[in-house]
Structure formats: C-alpha cells, structure tokens
Image (cartoon, rainbow, N blue to C red):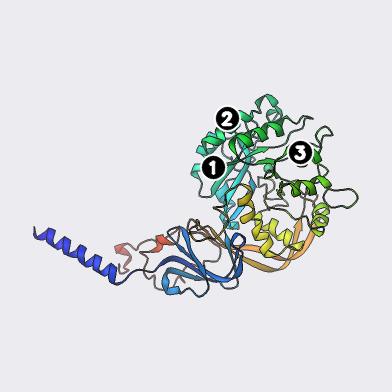
Amino acid sequence: MKKLMACSVVALLTAAGANAQPGPAYDLLLRGGHVIDAKNHIDAVMDVAIKDGKIARVAAGLKAADAVKAIDVRGLYVTPGLIDLHTHNYFGTGEKNSYAGDLSVVPDGFTFRTGVTTVVDAGCAGWRNFEDFKDKVIDRSKTRILAMLNIVGKGMRSGNIQQDMTDMDGEETAKMALRYPKVIVGIKTAHFNGPEWLPVEQAVIAGIKANIPVMVDFGADRPTRPLYDLLTKKLRPGDIYTHMFSGLRQEQDPVTKGPQKGLIEGRARGVYFDAGTGGGSFKWSLAVPFIQQGFKPDSLSTDLHVDSMNSSTKDLLNVASKFMAMGLSVSEVVAEMTAHPAKEIRREDLGNLSVGSVADVAVLRVQKGKFGFTDMVNSRMDGNSKLVDEMTIKDGKIVYDLNGMEALPWTAPQGDISQDRRWTSWPRPKPRPDDGVKLH
Ligand SMILES: [Zn+2]
C-alpha cells in the first residue's frame, strides 16, 4: 500500500515537472543555411526546424535553445533530400549480367553520402518478380526506394528476355502496380531492339490503367518507330523520356545542334525530359548546345549501376556539378533533383520542405577548385565548382555526416545523451558502470 502511494506521488511530481518545464519545441534545428525549396519558392538564408520526423518550421531567427540539437550550417545549402529518378537497385539475386542481379547496386551504399534520400528503380523488375525485389531490397533498405515496373514481366534481364514481346502485358503490369501504389510510381520500357511499337503501347496501357507515368529508354533507333512519333503521338503528357542527351536516337537536330523538333513539341505537350546519364547516355556535344538553346532537363538522374557509378556518371552530385559547369545555377540543379522529379512521379509529398512534410534534408557544400567532368565518349569539360554532401537527414534523423558537424569533440564532456534518438540515427552509447564515468 505504501509502495503504491509512493509511485503515484512520483507520477504526480513528474507530470507537474513536465508542465512547469516543457522540453525544447524541436528535435533538430539547422541554423543559418541557404535554403533552396523550389516547390515553396524559397531561396534564402533561413533556419529549418524538425520535430517527430517532419518539417516543423522554416523561418529566419529560430533559437538554438528551442531544439534538442542545433547545428550551425552557415555557408552551406539546405535542400530537400535529393530524389534520383533513374537508378538500378535489384541486387543480390546472384544472376549474372542482369539488372535483376549483378549489374544493380546496393542503394544504401550510394545514396545518403550524396544527399539522396529517395531513389526510383527504373524497371529492374517486372510484374512477375517485383515482389521478390520488394522483399529482398525495398523493404530492407534505409533509403526510400520507389519503383517503375518493367513492361517485360520478367524484368530487365540478360539474353532475349527484354526482347520477348509475349511477356509484355500491360494488364498484368497494371494489376501489380495497383497492388503496391505507395511503392510503384511508374512503368518502364527499355532496351528494345525490334521495329515494333508494342513495348511502348503496352507500357502506356499499363500507365493508363494504373494512373502512373511511363518512362522510356527508347532502345535501338528504328525508322519504323521514329522518336518524333514517340514524343508527339505515343506518349501522354506527364510521361518521361530518359537518356535525353545520348544522341543515340536522333535527339539532336543535325542543323541547329539543339534538340530535334520532336523534343520541342513533346515538351510543349507535357512530356518530361530526364538526364539519366548512365554509362552511355550523356554527351557534351549534345548537352552543351541543348543547354545553350534553353533546353534544360526537367530532372537530373544518374542511371546508377555497377558501371556508371565508376565511369563518367559517378553519382548524382557529380551529374549536378556537370550541369553547373554548363551554366546552371545551384538553385536550378537542386530543383531538378527535388521538386521536379517529385512532380514527375506524382509524389509531391516528397522533394520539398513544407511544414508537415517528411523531414528528408540534404546539406550541401559548393566546393571551389579545379575539377574535370567526363561524358560517355570520355571527353572532358573542366569546371571550378563541385557539389559535396555534408549531411543527410532522413525521416528527421541524421543518417550521414561527412565532417562530424553534429558530433562533440572527443575531449568534451558527453553531456546529456538521453534525447539523442530524437535527432540522430546513431545515438551515443550509454556509459557502462565499469567505465568509471558518472551515469546520469
Ligand atoms: Zn537505366
């Protein structure tokens, strides 16, 4: 009886204490960075406050004392977590020479260190093997993985699998897309060599039935299915043309050196154009005149796989730095990795810093120096700026911190560690009694 009374007294005191001294309003506060949030038209020095995994406030003059953890990010850019619209992540099946296998990369190994919090897998799996991909990779990764279903039921695999028109079924593909609407955000057709329109037509059928966009890698250049017709007749407004700077399907007008009229008319009717620079899909000889003539990409993306990650593409910030070398501003390249791709996949809940949005954030540095950027034919453009990721936050918690901005000097007192879980994914360990450190 006595014990019960004691407990209730403690409970009362705790409740009274909580009322008298409320804790800090925010879990994490990034102070003094240059915020770029294209969706909300913010391009200015501001503070970003995070609470319970969501953006709580974006404003100037927020106080450090109002957050459990405040970090000074002056001189850096603070942007929504980056979205890489074209990647390949279906690794681990053991299949050789296959994007549902050895050609794909482990997403967590390549995302957070470049400010990327969301990737879109561009068609590694079709409706027959999507659930295996989901089980093996999507559900086990820290990175947010969205997917485009390949119109080929067996997915993006070696041999003649990608050429098998009998396995391109818009109805079955749409059914699977509708089963996982939070994850499947598009339909992909890719690498088709034949003269037929069937892959594009079946992809569009799936896109209509599942109400999601189609992304096209147009494969071999065939006179029976010209690029002009794809962009002006076959695709719908809102569909996506990737590898826009490859030059492999007559994207470039031979006279003006700018985009051929199909790209211009396609954009006018609402088709989106994605970089997808990859291993063999980006040439300076196209990109420079396109940009000079005002035909900029709607979205920047890597087409990351085991070859492109080590050759000219490297990572999303390297791609963005190439476009800065061609004259795009930091604000433009950030928009093309955040709000723009979010709009293309109709996930406008992502890629912004609106109050209430998921707190995915990248803190970027523009490094000055002498840099070289290469293309698919290994020619180089020199540049003097490069984007580097300093810190990445996913769902309100720090998941990458290049220079330990959030950490205390190793000689400093540890302080209160009880609230660490509110702002970081790697809270400091509690000292053990035999460490000789006084416990809190
Ligand atoms: Zn690809």
Mark 1 to mark 3: distance in Å?
28 Å
Is 181 placed above or below 30 here?
A: above
Q: On the rendered image, what quadrant is the N terminus found in?
A: bottom left
**In the image, 12: left or right of 209?**
left
Is 150 placed above or below 275 here?
A: above
Q: Which structural element holds mark 1?
A: loop
**Which residue is label 1 attached to?**
183
Residue in view at x 77 percent, y 32 percent: 193
Residue in view at x 68 percent, y 61 percent: 332
Query: Which tag is nearer the camera, tag 1 or tag 2?
Result: 1
Is 276 placed above or below 424 here?
A: above
Residue 368 picture location, percent across and down: 69, 69
Is 176 placed above or below 35 here?
A: above
Is ligand 1 closer than 8 angstroms to the Cβ of mark 2? no
- Which residue is more in the foreground, 50 or 135? 50
**In the image, 49: left or right of 257?**
left
* Residue 153 appears in the picture as rendered: no
Q: Which structural element holds mark 3?
A: helix
Mark 1 to mark 2: distance in Å?
16 Å
**Which residue is label 3 attached to?**
233
**Which residue is label 2 attached to?**
128
Query: Which tag is nearer the camera, tag 1 or tag 3?
Result: 3
- Which residue is more in the foreground, 408 or 41? 41
Three-letter code, disc 3: Lys
**Label 3 packing within 10 angstroms: few (<14), some (14-19), many (20+):** few
Three-letter code, disc 2: Arg
Residue 112 picture location, percent across and down: 56, 55
Is ligand 1 closer than 8 angstroms to the Cβ of mark 1? no
Residue 207 picture location, percent across and down: 63, 37
* Residue 316 appears in the picture as rendered: yes
Mark 2 to mark 3: distance in Å?
29 Å
Looking at the image, tell me whether mark 1 or mark 3 is earlier in sequence order: 1
